[in-house]
Image (cartoon, grey):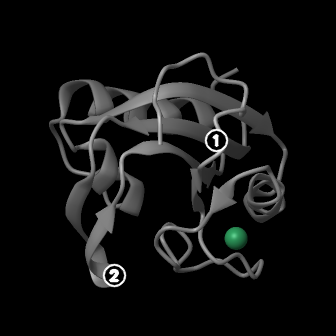
Amino acid sequence: MNRLSGAYEIEIVLSRSAQLRIGSLGMCRLPRGRYVYVGSARGGLEPRVGRHLRLAETKRGGGRWHVDALLRLPQARIAAVRLYPGRDECDLSREVAARPGATVPIPRFGAMDCRGGCQAHLYRMRNAECGMRNNVKD
Ligand SMILES: [Zn+2]
């Protein structure tokens, strides 16, 4: 079960706005709210997602992905995780982009090596109806 390849999605809640440096993208500002990040892992979806969860929980440790800078923020927490074994991350990213209220807060976030034409692999969900039970208001 822990050798699965495929795509995953993590829902991140920012309880207040943030300013953060994200690798080559430089300083970015993110409003508080709900976000969905789409990633992929070859041969280890569960270890990869487990890493993100630990970082979000402990706020300690490195991480080379853009999303790690986000997860390290004190006001960031992971609200949900979904695994999609065998699925292409850009395919999943396009699906998330098409959900009601999805916007791209930081072009190219998480998608520096994307070949699927995605604007980014991080979306802000302005519409609260993304299957979540949480009281974050825009
Ligand atoms: Zn993509």
Is 36 rendered above or below residue 118? above
- Of the pair 84 and 44, the residue shown nearer to us: 84
- Of the pair 56 and 61, the residue shown nearer to us: 56
Circle on res. 9: 1
Q: Secondary structure at mark 2?
A: helix
Q: Which residue is mark 2?
A: 25
Direction from residue 103 to residue 56 in the image, left or right: left
The Cα atoms of the two marked residues, 2 and 1, are separated by 21 Å
Could one spot residue 44 in this view of the protein? no
Residue drawn 42% across and 35% down?
13
Numbered label tally: 2
Location of residue 14 in the rendering, given as x and y in whole percent from the top left corner? 35, 40
Residue drawn 60% across and 53% down?
39
- Of the pair 138 and 122, the residue shown nearer to us: 138
- Of the pair 58 and 128, the residue shown nearer to us: 128
Location of residue 67 in the rendering, given as x and y in whole percent from the top left corner? 40, 54
Location of residue 114 in the rendering, given as x and y in whole percent from the top left corner? 65, 77
- Amino acid on which the number 1 mark rests in the picture: Glu
Could one spot residue 78 in this view of the protein? yes
Residue drawn 46% across and 38% down?
12
Is 30 rendered above or below residue 57? below
Is 35 rendered above or below residue 66? above
Location of residue 53 in the rendering, given as x and y in whole percent from the top left corner? 40, 28
The image quadrant of residue 21 is bottom left
Tags 2 and 1 touching, CB below 8 Å: no
